[in-house]
Amino acid sequence: MTSPAGIVRKDARISDAARLMGESEYRHLVVVDDSGRAIGMLSALDVVRALVGVPTRHPDAFPHLDPRTGLT
């Protein structure tokens, strides 16, 4: 991974993440919360899927936040 890591805030627009990736060598970005703590990773494939409206896939065993229910 590139050092220093590229970061994106949790409330950033996907187009902002896409622009950062497109203008840099970053293929992954660390997603940070309001306190600057890492809460996830965003890949170039995640960005492409979001831009074309294809849902992100996670393995069943992978813990993730369900925004609909608020559960992890």
Image (cartoon, rainbow, N blue to C red):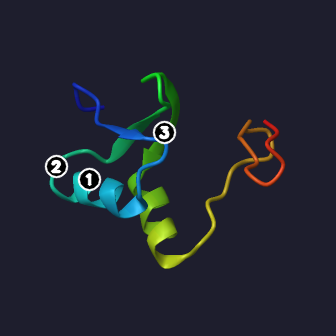
Please give the name of the residue rendered at 35% of the width and 64% of the height, measured from the top-left corner.
15
Please give the name of the residue rendered at 58% of the width and 73% of the height, measured from the top-left corner.
54
Please give the name of the residue rendered at 76% of the width and 48% of the height, measured from the top-left corner.
66
Neighbor class of circle 2 (other Cα within 10 Å; few <14, some 14-19, many 20+) is few
Give how far apart the Cα atoms at labels 1 and 2 are.
5 Å
Q: Is residue 24 above or below residue 37?
A: below
Determine which residue is flagged by label 1: 21
Secondary structure of the residue carrying tag 1 is helix
Q: Quadrant of residue 65?
A: top right
Secondary structure of the residue carrying tag 2 is loop
Determine which residue is flagged by label 2: 24
The kind of residue on which mark 3 rests is Met
Give how far apart the Cα atoms at labels 2 and 3 are.
17 Å
Determine which residue is flagged by label 3: 41
State the image coordinates of residue 59 (x, y, percent, origin top left): 73, 47
Image quarter of the C terminus: top right
Q: Is residue 62 above or below residue 37?
A: below
Extreme residue toward the left, this view: 23
Neighbor class of circle 3 (other Cα within 10 Å; few <14, some 14-19, many 20+) is few
Secondary structure of the residue carrying tag 3 is strand
Give how far apart the Cα atoms at labels 1 and 3 are.
13 Å
Q: Is residue 38 above or below residue 26?
A: above
Q: Which mark is residue 37?
A: none
Q: From the viewer's perspective, tell me whether residue 63 is left or right of residue 71.
A: left
Asked whether the residues under the numbered discs 1 and 2 touch, taking CB atoms below 8 Å apart as contact, a structural biologist would say yes
The kind of residue on which mark 1 rests is Met
Q: Quadrant of residue 26?
A: top left
State the image coordinates of residue 10 (x, y, percent, origin top left): 49, 42
2 or 3: tag closer to the N-terminus: 2
